[in-house]
């Protein structure tokens, strides 16, 4: 008769053998694909290139730049193609940086004191991205509430359906449903309709602006739900039976709005920063997206701390006390909506004046296309 211990030992050895085989296959696939991976050549230290532009511009602070920018130093497109970079056309604005590419005398062809137009435009590009990036931080503050105060609000609502208890944290599933749904709706319905209407799709900046508007709507909706939650509140809510009689499913619209805003903001943000980042700095564009989320979390913590310090004076419970029925969470949501609205207005100013970088080859392609249209 086979003992139970021996059977268990055989199963354990069988599982360990399968686990070893799976890891062996994974290692084999990794080693097999490594030689075929396309490695891109590095294009030097971008920090040094940036510093060089500022140093060269500072040394030539008393130089004058001609309006037509004909006296600026630049290499030909063939030279850039050898290094895998693209030549960027000169743009107006931030003219003090153009001094780094100004040629004064023949001896000024010194690499320490002279930069190309493309190098200068790379720095301009990063400086123009920063205001847009700063404006996206407030959106991340709004997005953070979905995993914090939305859950606290849901815990103070009626979380039962018959005999079933719904976890407030599980309501984020409606955010996921909204993201998946709006991606399909945008690609299949909204985008084709806009293209037929105006012969082109929405730009990344326009989509990010729509994301901010939806974020404002989400905060207004959350504040409105909180007003009705307080209206139906029953006192202290250490368990869900003593919470407000308002159903937790009234939170669905605010979760859906947050999900819709993600489709417009985060997708557009990633495409915008990656597309506008200069060659060799594509990872910088992705890093800006991650930094926006991180700074949003920190900013949210700072705002909550400041609000609690201000609203808990004179022994007041504050806006966000332990017992939400004694506080005013709706005021906090409306405050975030107001701050996001101000952020949206600042964003509109910088987005409307933003100048997209245009590589030389794409500029020539556009000119050729325009000539063909004129011939037709």
Image (cartoon, rainbow, N blue to C red):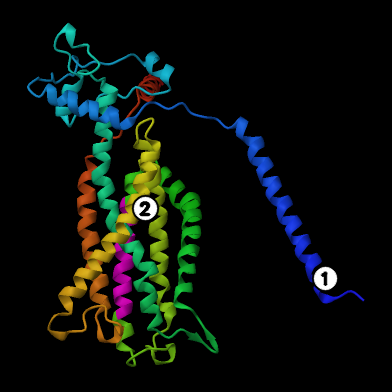
Residue sticking out furthest to the left: 62
Q: Nearer the viewer, residue 257 or 61?
A: 61
State the separation of the CA atoms marked 2 and 1: 55 Å
The residue under the point 82% across, 76% down is 4
**Secondary structure found at label 2:** helix
Range shown magenta: 209-226
In the depicted structure, whether residue 258 falls above or below residue 84: below
**Secondary structure found at label 1:** helix
Task: Please tell me whether residue 211 belongs to the stretch shown in magenta.
Answer: yes
In the depicted structure, whether residue 315 falls above or below residue 114: below
Earlier in the chain: of badge 2 and badge 1, it is: 1
Horizontal and vertical percent position of residue 199: 39, 39
Can residue 163 be seen from the camera position used here? yes
Residue 7: which disc? Answer: 1
The residue under the point 21% across, 40% down is 353
Residue sticking out furthest to the top: 106
Task: Please tell me whether residue 124 belongs to the stretch shown in magenta.
Answer: no
- Could you tell whether 208 is left or right of 348 in the image? right
The quadrant in which the N terminus is found is: bottom right
Q: Are marks 2 and 1 in contact (CB under 8 Å)?
A: no
Residue 241 found in image quarter: bottom left
Report the residue marked by disc 2: 265
């Amino acid at each position: 008769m086979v003992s139970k211990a021996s059977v268990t030992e055989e199963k354990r050895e069988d599982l360990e053998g399968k686990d070893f085989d799976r890891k062996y296959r994974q290692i084999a696939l990794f080693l097999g694909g490594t030689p075929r991976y396309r490695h891109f050549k590095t294009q030097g230290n971008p920090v040094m290139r940036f510093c060089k532009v500022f140093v060269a511009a500072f040394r030539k602070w008393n130089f004058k730049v001609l309006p037509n920018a004909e006296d600026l130093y630049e290499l030909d497109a063939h030279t850039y193609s050898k290094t895998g970079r693209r030549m960027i056309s000169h743009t107006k604005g931030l003219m003090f940086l153009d001094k780094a590419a100004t040629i004064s005398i023949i001896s000024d062809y010194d690499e320490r004191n002279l930069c190309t137009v493309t190098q200068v435009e790379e720095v301009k590009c990063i400086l123009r991205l920063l205001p847009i990036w700063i404006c996206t931080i407030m959106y991340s503050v709004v997005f953070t509430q979905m995993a914090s105060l939305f859950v606290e609000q849901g815990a103070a609502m009626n979380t039962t359906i018959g005999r079933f208890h719904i976890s407030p944290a599980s309501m984020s599933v409606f955010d996921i449903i909204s993201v998946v749904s709006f991606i399909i709706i945008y690609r299949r319905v909204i985008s084709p309709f806009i293209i037929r209407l105006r012969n082109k799709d929405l730009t990344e900046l326009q989509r990010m602006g729509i994301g901010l508007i939806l974020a404002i709507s989400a905060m207004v909706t959350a504040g409105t739900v909180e007003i009705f939650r307080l209206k139906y509140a029953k006192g202290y809510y250490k368990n869900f039976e003593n919470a407000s009689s308002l159903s937790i499913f009234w939170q669905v619209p605010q979760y859906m709005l947050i999900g819709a805003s993600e489709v417009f903001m985060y997708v557009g943000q990633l495409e915008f920063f990656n597309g506008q980042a200069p060659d060799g700095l594509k990872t910088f564009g992705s890093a800006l997206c991650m930094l926006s989320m991180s700074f949003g979390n920190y900013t949210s913590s700072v705002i909550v701390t400041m609000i609690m310090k201000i609203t808990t004076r004179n022994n007041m419970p504050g806006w966000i006390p332990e017992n939400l029925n004694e506080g005013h969470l709706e005021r906090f949501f409306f405050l975030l909506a107001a701050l996001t609205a101000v952020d949206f207005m600042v964003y509109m100013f910088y987005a409307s004046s933003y100048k997209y970088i245009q590589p030389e080859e794409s500029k020539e392609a556009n000119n050729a296309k325009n000539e063909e249209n004129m011939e037709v």
